[in-house]
Amino acid sequence: MRDELSTRQAAVRLRLAGEKVEDICKTLNRTPQWFHKWWRRYMDAGPVGLYDLTRSRRQVANRTPPHIEKAVISIRKRLAKRATSETRYGLVGATQIRAELEKLGYWPLPSERTIERIVNQAGLTCPTLSLARRISRTEYPGPQPQESNQVHQVDFVGPRYLEGDRTRYYFLVCRDVYDHAVYMEFVDKRSTDTVLASLVRAWQRLGIPEIK
């Protein structure tokens, strides 16, 4: 079981690093069906989803010691008071709480999902913000991917400037819509040749999509 779990974790690490699914399967001697099963489990439940279901449920139930739960609640209450000028506009969410636990030397560190659960069960969740409905609720049809490398989204962000530098800089971001693998590149031109060259490098890392 440990060897199989390590293989699943390795597959996720390789995909997060931008490796192609076909290369991952070849390296780990697994099928694409195997990869997509465990990638979906990871996307739905995080690292704990890589365990077999019975082990996963037991892990979820027992993984947070009581003294860490108490620490999470205490830290949340302290941050939410915003009692000092340093904390008046500070973050109070799971990321901030986990960072403080780490600085205090707590172990094992709970995941952000676990911290959110603890905060919710303690009744310390902030009220949901109600936003006004948008005037236009038109929904535009689009391709719905069923697996990796079917649909890629490409965004060009910019221009951005560095202090004392009049050069225009741009970020080209290519994202796999299905599994959210990302390739990002920093360029100083927005020409067609620059975009095409960047896309070639993105698809060399992520794989060529069926729909661009």
Image (tube, rainbow, N blue to C red):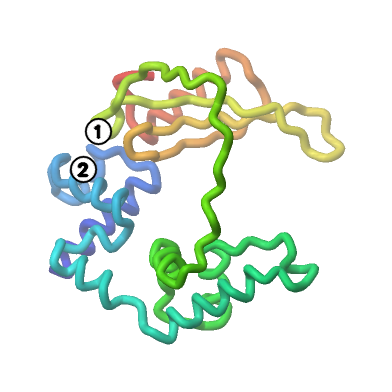
- The correct choice, above or below, for 210 with respect to 157 in the image is above
Q: Quadrant of the C terminus?
A: top left
Res 182 visible: yes
Q: Horizontal and vertical percent for residue 109?
A: 43, 74
Secondary structure of the residue carrying tag 2 is helix
Which amino acid type is shown beneath numbered disc 1? Glu
Q: Which circle's residue, 1 or 2, is located before the other in the chain?
A: 2
Residues under labels 1 and 2: Cα distance? 7 Å
Res 111 visible: no
Q: Quadrant of residue 175?
A: top left
Between 193 and 50, the one nearer to me in the picture:
50
Circle 1 sits on which residue?
Answer: 147
The residue lying at 72 percent from left, 68 percent from top is 87
The residue lying at 14 percent from left, 46 percent from top is 34
- The correct choice, above or below, for 104 with respect to 208 in the image is below
The residue lying at 46 percent from left, 30 percent from top is 174
Q: Horizontal and vertical percent for residue 92?
A: 60, 64
Q: Quadrant of the N terminus?
A: bottom left
Circle 2 sits on which residue?
Answer: 36
Which amino acid type is shown beneath numbered disc 2? His
Q: Horizontal and vertical percent for residue 162?
A: 78, 38
Look at the numbered discs 1 and 2 and tell me whether their residues touch, using CB distance below 8 Å: yes
Secondary structure of the residue carrying tag 1 is loop
